[in-house]
Image: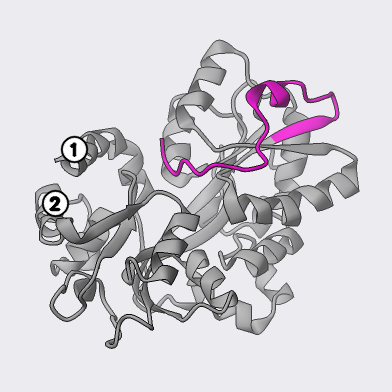
Amino acid sequence: MIRPILLSAALSIGAAMSAGAQDMVFTSWGGTTQDGQAQSWAAPFTAATGIKVLQDGPTDYGKLKAMVESGNVSWDVVDVEYDFAIAAAKMGLLEPIDYSVVDRASIDPRFATDYAVGSFYYSFVIGYNKDVLKVTPQTWADVFDTAKFPGKRTFYKWSAPGVLELALLADGVAAADLYPLDLDRAFAKLDTIKSDIIWWGGGAESQQLLASGEAPLGMFWNGRIFAIQQGGGNVGVSWEQNLTAADVLVVPKGAKHKEAAMKFLAEATSAAAQAKFATVTGYAPINVNSKAEMDAAVVASLPDSHTESQINLDMNYWADNRDEIASRWYSWQAQ
């Protein structure tokens, strides 16, 4: 399972299943991300429609699959990673998006498919603690340079797009030549600093590692750097070769409140809702009209304001190869 962040206010599945006829259940990853989704999407949706949005989490792919296969689906809208959505659609686990309700024309075409619509768009970036590091890191190669940049590094714990790509970039692979991933070369590069890696499994953990200086350098979701900076933390960011990906929203096959779910997707992907979420989280909106409603300073901190050396992670490659890569990834981590 990816990104198992605990949600302090999460409902139990039993509570979710007790949702009334005018209620629907939204499941996401917890923490400040889901707080932002509740504030920016769910609250306005309920005010406009009268439909209550019950929050559940964290997202669990095995649980979603089991719900659909058993015919007992208690989730209506789920925030998932893009590569999972691609695979889940192929497995018949998702309802098609009703684009007579959701305005597909306003969504960045990269983040709209027959079975998923964008939730938010983010980048993995290099973050560093300015109080600890006296030299400014710029590239992924710098992250692997323990002589010039001493101390622990922190990387994303789970088998997912990002770490293998940055290792290859640090080893000199050109962005255009990343896929298919040279796994032997990527793991060999990671071996060079393996003893210096502290793994983070969730955004809050990554923030703590960086802000405290326990790991003064590493890879982070750009929104987590934004959050530390907004809180006054003395951290910096390099957007050099930032690695982009997206979360998307899906409706599990057999969802009990499909009509409400589609209306929720329409609200969540609207220009105003996406602008509000981007403002409170630092993640980019997937609605092409949202930035016109946002402060220029916030827009400047978003991934799509840093496209010069940006690299889009290949979600189709990961959808086809994630299980195979995961087997090797977790075996390597355990060694």
Percent position of residue 176, x then y: 23, 64
Percent position of residue 204, x then y: 50, 57
Left or right for 267, reference 224: right
Q: Residue at x 62, y 33 (%)?
A: 251
Question: Where 322 sits versus 307, above or below?
Answer: above
Q: Which amino acid, by three-letter code, is at mark 1?
A: Arg
Q: Nearer the viewer, residue 74 or 214?
A: 214
Q: Are marks 2 and 1 in contact (CB under 8 Å)?
A: yes
**Residue 163 included in the magenta stretch of the image:** no
Callout 1 environment at 10 Å: few (<14), some (14 to 19), or many (20+)?
few
Left or right for 307, reference 38: left
Q: Residue at x 19, y 73 (%)?
A: 141
Percent position of residue 55, x then y: 69, 38
Q: Which residues are magenta?
A: 1-25
Q: Nearer the viewer, residue 332 or 87?
A: 332
Residue 186 picture quarter: bottom left
Question: Where 17 sits versus 135, above or below?
Answer: above
Q: Quadrant of the C terminus?
A: top left
**Residue 11 included in the magenta stretch of the image:** yes
Residue 195 picture quarter: bottom left
User: Residue under circle 2?
Assistant: 187
User: Residue under circle 1?
Assistant: 328
Give the dominant element type of the magenta stretch: helix, strand or loop: loop
Left or right for 105, reference 212: right
Left or right for 247, reference 76: left
Percent position of residue 155, x then y: 31, 58
Q: Which mark is residue 37?
A: none
Q: Which amino acid, by three-letter code, is at mark 2?
A: Phe
Mark yes or no: residue 332 visible: yes
